[in-house]
Image (cartoon, grey):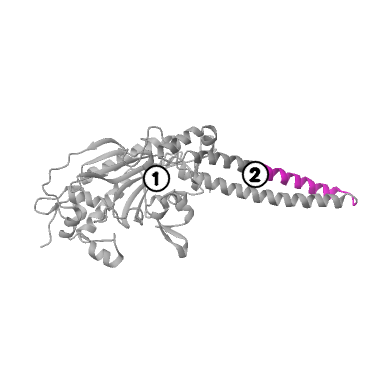
């Protein structure tokens, strides 16, 4: 596994990394620990290299020595062999300590990202006006009365936070996924249906086995992980490869089921399908050169806006504060839809610029104009997910308990209005 954050940046400008740690609310002292372990590792490598060179020279002397000189030289060679063995053990320990120190530091945030935690985001734009809805019903009441969601049997079959999407509910979700797949392919994405079980090195490479590892399902008997987003297999798709980015960024859209334990959210959003253990999602994923990443981030946000326009719900775009970014993200924008019953905005999409963080871990490179391999950049962004049904149902409900189907989804659902079951 290759390094995580850029060691050149760390060595030449550690204050930038310290500032990033402070902005995230994390320990800047970890930077000094990494610098020390980096120096120790390099010293251990040099010491082992020097001793190996001495050992090689001593071996040559033995071959040329006279019978009288040979015993002493053999003793010297034996002593050097023991020293080399000890030096290599010390080098391995230094490498292990360095890797642990390196893995502890999150991606360096981009200039301009708000400092602070979950509540310190900056609203960039608000789109659409919430409709005045007298005594709005929440998505659970609507979903059950319309025969779209069956939470009771979901719990009977699988436990809390599982559900069945039934009838038009299933058609709504499939329509959303189809709309996202079509938008993605129309904009040059390659549609993928990836595996949802991945190896530990792929899960770790994307940064999901850090602070939030308790959210990930692990299949112990096979040493595989269930993905919480198709970002994970798409990031691993080109691991240990050198990409041809001469024609521009490589864009993929992964359609998959996703699995999250929600271990840190007990008592939070337990009603309905806002925070569940299994859901479907279409995720955009981009490989590009680092200088293209900022523009690609804006494009991903633009495609998310196009999708939200298709479901016709009020939303806002927020710039996530550094302390609320995942380990891999250097900047993240969320689009949050208005929920009438909660009288607040709730996340529907995220898009993250991960700069070179994931690609370093997964050894994804490209050749620059001189043919020299360089670390690529990666980005990701939600294009549709099960949670969108919540915003659709609540924002398009009618006084009689029916729900208007957004025009773009009518061909998939087969009706313009969902009526309560008699």
Of residue 159 and residue 2, the one placed in the foreground of this image is 159
Badge 2 local density, few (<14 within 10 Å), some, or many (20+)? many
Could you tell which of marks 1 and 2 lies nearer the N-terminus? 2
- In terms of image quadrants, where is residue 422? bottom left
Up/down of 10 relative to 271, above or below: above
Up/down of 113 relative to 202, above or below: above
Badge 1 local density, few (<14 within 10 Å), some, or many (20+)? many
- Farthest residue, direction bottom: 157
Callout 1 touching callout 2 (CB < 8 Å): no
Residue 376, given in percent of the width and then of the height, sits at 47, 41
Write down the region rendered in magenta. 44-67
Residue 69, given in percent of the width and then of the height, sits at 88, 49
Residue 180, given in percent of the width and then of the height, sits at 29, 48
Q: Which residue is disc 1 drawn over?
A: 326
Q: Residue 127 carries which label?
A: none
Q: Is residue 130 left or right of residue 56?
A: left
Of residue 262 and residue 363, the one placed in the foreground of this image is 262
Q: In this view, does 369 lie to the left or right of 309?
A: right
Predominant secondary structure, magenta span: helix
Q: Does the magenta stretch include residue 29?
A: no
Is residue 390 at all visible to an observer of this figure?
A: yes
Q: SS of the residue at dot 2? A: helix
Residue 269, given in percent of the width and then of the height, sits at 27, 53
Q: How far apart are marks 1 and 2 (CA)?
A: 33 Å
Residue drawn at 59 percent across, 47 percent down? 95
- Farthest residue, direction left: 400
Q: SS of the residue at dot 1? A: loop
- In terms of image quadrants, where is residue 260? bottom left
Is residue 242 at all visible to an observer of this figure?
A: no
Residue drawn at 22 percent across, 49 percent down? 391
Q: Which residue is disc 2 drawn over?
A: 44
């Amino acid at each position: 596994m290759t390094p995580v954050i850029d060691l050149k940046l760390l060595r030449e400008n550690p204050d930038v990394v310290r500032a990033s740690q402070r902005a995230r609310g994390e320990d800047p002292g970890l930077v000094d620990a990494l610098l020390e372990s980096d120096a120790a590792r390099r010293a251990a490598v040099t010491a082992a290299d020097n001793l190996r060179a001495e050992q090689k020279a001593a071996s040559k002397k033995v071959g040329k020595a006279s019978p009288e000189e040979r015993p002493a030289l053999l003793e010297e060679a034996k002593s050097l062999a023991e020293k080399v063995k000890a030096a290599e053990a010390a080098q391995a320990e230094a490498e292990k300590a360095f890797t642990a120190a390196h893995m502890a530091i999150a991606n360096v945030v981009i200039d301009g990202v708000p400092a602070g935690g979950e509540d310190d985001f900056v609203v960039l734009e608000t789109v659409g006006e919430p409709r005045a809805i007298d005594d709005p019903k929440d998505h659970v009441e609507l979903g059950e009365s319309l025969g779209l969601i069956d939470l009771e049997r979901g719990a009977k079959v699988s436990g809390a936070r599982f559900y069945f999407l039934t009838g038009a509910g299933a058609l709504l979700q499939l329509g959303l996924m189809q709309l996202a797949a079509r938008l993605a392919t129309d904009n040059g994405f390659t549609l993928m249906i990836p595996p949802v079980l991945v190896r530990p090195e792929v899960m770790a490479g994307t940064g999901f086995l850090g602070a939030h590892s308790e959210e990930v399902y692990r299949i112990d008997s096979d040493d595989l992980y269930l993905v919480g987003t198709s970002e994970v297999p798409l990031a691993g798709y080109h691991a240990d490869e050198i990409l041809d980015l001469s024609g521009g960024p490589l864009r993929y859209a992964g359609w998959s089921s996703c699995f999250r334990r929600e271990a840190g959210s007990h008592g939070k959003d337990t009603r309905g399908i806002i925070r569940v253990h299994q859901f479907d999602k279409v995720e955009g994923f981009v490989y590009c050169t680092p200088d293209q990443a900022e523009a690609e981030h804006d494009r991903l946000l633009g495609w998310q806006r196009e999708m939200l326009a298709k479901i016709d719900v009020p939303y806002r775009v927020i710039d996530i504060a550094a302390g609320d970014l995942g380990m891999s993200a250097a900047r993240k924008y969320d689009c949050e839809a208005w929920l009438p019953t909660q009288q607040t905005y709730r996340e529907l999409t995220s898009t993250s610029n991960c700069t070179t963080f994931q690609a370093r871990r997964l050894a994804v490179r490209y050749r620059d104009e001189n043919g020299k391999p360089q670390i690529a950049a990666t980005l990701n962004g939600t294009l549709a997910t099960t949670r969108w049904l919540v915003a659709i149902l609540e924002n398009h409900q009618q006084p009689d308990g029916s729900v208007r189907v957004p025009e773009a989804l009518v061909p998939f659902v087969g009706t313009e209005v969902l009526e309560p079951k008699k």
